[in-house]
């Protein structure tokens, strides 16, 4: 079969599988098969750049990097919605509509808590995506929206349409992302909405591509000619075009039915796979939209019913302090238990002392608390009118609540730390971390067991884990384990000795050394002792390792306790080397290259792959960390920037010479 035909077939197949998976939630092939077809298509497109097309499924992996966001004007403004907070206000809305016409039905939709976006298709091809912005002018996010798998890149008909909808992140994707960020020492997102917004506001589309974003489409903008189809019919057409339409959307014939449906959403909001913050009620008859009209801000034919805020009033019984694995001290409010949206809340994080002082939170205060993005409860504000006068202003502790040693705070940091390596609280937390899944992955040595063994005196430091086997009998008798489960645990402990270096490194719990950084370091240095010996310059010369991480690593290994612990682990036979596979260390090993202008003898993609095959990384924008800028014909601003920053500029023939091609 010729390449052109095969490319076409592959694209059609992949688009269908993609649709089944991401829009219909009903995959019909395995991920492995999907990846295989995707690779075949990618290879064919690389061999035949003349067939590369912007609507190919291969375009969804990202790669385009912008220098800045372009502003785009919305031809039809992106309006907001008027709000209703109770059933009476919804009935008032119905009365206003019925003054104009009594022949009306409604459509009720969940109000997705994400961010609004507009998508433009020309001749059935996805052309542009933009944020709402201020309603008149938004930002061009085409590069990122192309990576959202539930957004079709081409439609079955050659139509010119603009559709609008909500970009969001499912709760599960949000939690997985935050777990990963926590492990890597990155700040966590507060809620799925912020995570979605943060992902869409990335200049590098590779980042957005990894974020598992999704999009529900909920309107098609009106053309100049009056439209006689109903809103429900329009949604069905959009569904047939391949857009993801929320399956909970229903047509109802009266406002009472609409109210019933909004209550159903409100009572079941926890069951939704994504956050919803209300319901939207829209007139179904689109031909009435013009007559019913608009205010400057919003259409009069639709209204948003906002769910009751997930807030509650309760009392702070006391404030206590938690010591984390890194020694970080977190003030926590112990609350009189209160129900918020179906679950009982008895604690709220107070983050750090600056946060408590700023809100002037005191023991004994009546407070309004809120579930932040449905996850960790937070104090919204103190109801200071309810103070009796006996509440004492908050004072940060100066000594660790667990070990009594003085606490420390870095100059420009908000957090306070217990730096005593022997602090029992830190120890338990670090033992739990060491055996956790992303680290040494010792099944059976979870939080409860670690605490139990710690209390019984069997576990104090990490190396004690490898000494547990000497206490097999005692553990069976004293710690109340069956011989079978102890043997299983001991076997898992032994097996963990063979883990590749990155697991051990992450398990040590060095500040800012999360999963990803551990992998980068393990791959680069091969051996833990090489990392221990590295100075700051050596560490920061590694791609993705900055000064903050480097100085934390140095500080950790300057501590003789830590070095002794490593030696002890080594003496028990714990592996200290990298066992994974590495990319080739070619001429571009660990170098960052920016390609600009048009290359004559190869496509950009070919150049990129050749550089990557030699261990290099191709990035989109020039910075002081760029090693080479390869300038083809008509190179523009990136070349200027390279010259300004003193980055080495090479031409195409030098590139070929370096690549030996
Ligand atoms: S319709 C002109 N439908 O809510 C009408 N909006 O408060 C445009 N939203 O900016 C909006 N789910 O971001 C509509 N099913 C839904 C929605 C929805 C969420 C958001 C949207 C809009 C905001 C208005």
Image (cartoon, rainbow, N blue to C red):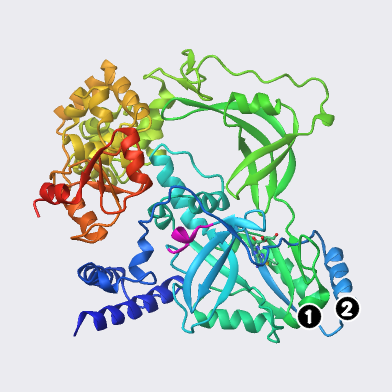
Q: CA distance from mark 1 to mark 2?
A: 9 Å
Q: Residue furthest right?
A: 99
Numbered disc total: 2
* Helix, strand or loop for disc 2: helix
Foreground pick, 375 / 121: 121
| Of the image marks 1 and 2, the number of the one nearer the N terminus | 2
For disc 1, the marked residue is: 288
| Residue 113 seen in the figure | yes
Place residue 304 in its image quadrant. Answer: bottom right
Label 2 crowding class (10 Å Cα cut-off): few <14, some 14-19, many 20+? Answer: few
Magenta residues span: 140-146
Residue 291 spot, x, y in % from top left: 82, 77
Label 1 crowding class (10 Å Cα cut-off): few <14, some 14-19, many 20+? Answer: many
Residue 446 spot, x, y in % from top left: 37, 41
Left or right: 14 as drawn, with respect to 564: right
User: Does residue 308 show up magenta in the picture?
Assistant: no
Residue 364 spot, x, y in % from top left: 74, 27
User: Where ligand 1 lies, by image quadrant?
Assistant: bottom right
Left or right: 92 as drawn, with respect to 479: right
């Amino acid at each position: 079969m010729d390449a052109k035909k095969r490319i076409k077939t592959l694209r059609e197949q992949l688009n269908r599988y993609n649709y089944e998976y991401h829009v219909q939630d009903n995959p019909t092939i395995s991920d492995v098969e999907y990846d295989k077809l995707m690779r075949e298509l990618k290879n064919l497109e690389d061999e035949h750049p003349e067939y590369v097309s912007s609507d190919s499924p291969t375009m969804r992996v990202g790669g385009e990097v912008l220098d800045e966001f372009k502003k785009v004007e919305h031809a039809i403004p992106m309006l907001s919605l008027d709000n209703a907070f109770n059933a009476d206000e919804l009935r008032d809305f119905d009365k206003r509509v019925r003054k104009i016409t009594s022949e009306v039905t409604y459509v009720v939709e969940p109000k997705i808590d994400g961010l609004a976006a507009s998508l433009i298709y020309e001749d059935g091809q996805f052309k542009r995506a933009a944020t709402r912005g201020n309603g008149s002018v938004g930002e061009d996010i085409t590069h990122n929206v192309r990576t959202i798998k539930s957004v079709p890149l081409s439609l079955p008909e050659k139509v010119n349409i603009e559709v609008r909808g909500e970009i969001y992140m499912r709760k599960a994707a949000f939690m997985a992302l935050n777990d990963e960020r926590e492990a890597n020492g990155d700040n966590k997102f507060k809620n799925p909405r912020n995570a979605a917004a943060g992902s869409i506001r990335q200049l590098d589309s590779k980042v957005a591509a990894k974020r598992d974003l999704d999009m529900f489409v909920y309107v098609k903008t009106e053309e100049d000619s009056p439209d006689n189809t109903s809103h429900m019919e329009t949604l069905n057409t959009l569904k047939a075009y391949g857009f993801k339409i929320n399956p909970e959307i229903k047509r109802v014939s009266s406002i009472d039915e609409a109210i019933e449906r909004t209550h159903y959403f409100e009572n079941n909001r926890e069951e939704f796979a994504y956050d919803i913050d209300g319901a939207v009620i829209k007139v179904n008859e689109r031909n009435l939209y013009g007559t019913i009209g608009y205010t400057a801000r919003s259409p009069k034919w639709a209204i948003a019913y906002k769910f009751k805020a997930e807030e509650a009033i309760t009392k702070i019984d006391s404030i206590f302090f938690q010591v984390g694995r890194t020694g970080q001290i977190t003030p926590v409010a112990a609350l009189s238990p209160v129900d918020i949206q179906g679950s009982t809340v008895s604690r709220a994080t107070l983050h750090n002392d600056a946060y408590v002082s700023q809100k002037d939170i005191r023991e004994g205060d009546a407070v309004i608390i809120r579930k932040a993005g449905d996850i960790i409860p937070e104090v919204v504000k103190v109801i200071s009118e309810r103070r009796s006068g006996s509440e004492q202003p908050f004072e940060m502790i100066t000594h660790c609540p667990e070990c009594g040693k003085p606490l420390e705070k870095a100059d420009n940091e908000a957090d306070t730390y217990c730096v005593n390596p022997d602090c029992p609280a830190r120890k338990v937390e670090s033992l739990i971390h060491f055996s956790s899944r992303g680290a040494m992955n010792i099944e059976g040595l979870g939080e409860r067991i670690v605490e139990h063994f710690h209390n019984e005196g069997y576990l104090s430091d990490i190396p004690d884990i490898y000494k547990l086997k000497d206490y097999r009998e005692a553990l069976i008798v004293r710690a109340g384990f069956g011989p079978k489960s102890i043997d299983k645990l001991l076997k898992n402990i032994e097996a963990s000795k063979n883990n590749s270096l990155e697991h051990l490194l992450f398990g040590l719990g060095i500040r800012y050394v999360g999963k990803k950084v551990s992998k980068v370091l393990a791959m680069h240095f091969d051996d833990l002792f090489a990392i221990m010996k590295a100075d700051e310059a050596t560490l920061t010369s590694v791609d993705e390792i900055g000064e903050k991480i480097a100085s934390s690593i140095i500080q950790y290994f300057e501590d003789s306790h830590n070095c002794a612990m490593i030696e002890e682990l080594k003496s028990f036979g714990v592996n200290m080397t990298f066992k994974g596979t590495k990319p080739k260390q070619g001429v571009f090993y660990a170098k960052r290259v920016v390609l600009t202008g048009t290359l004559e003898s190869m496509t950009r993609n070919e150049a990129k792959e050749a550089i990557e095959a030699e261990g290099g990384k191709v990035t989109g924008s020039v910075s002081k960390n760029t090693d080479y800028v390869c300038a083809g014909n008509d190179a523009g601003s990136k070349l200027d920037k390279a010259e300004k920053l003193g980055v080495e500029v090479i031409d195409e023939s030098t590139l070929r010479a370096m690549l030996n091609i």
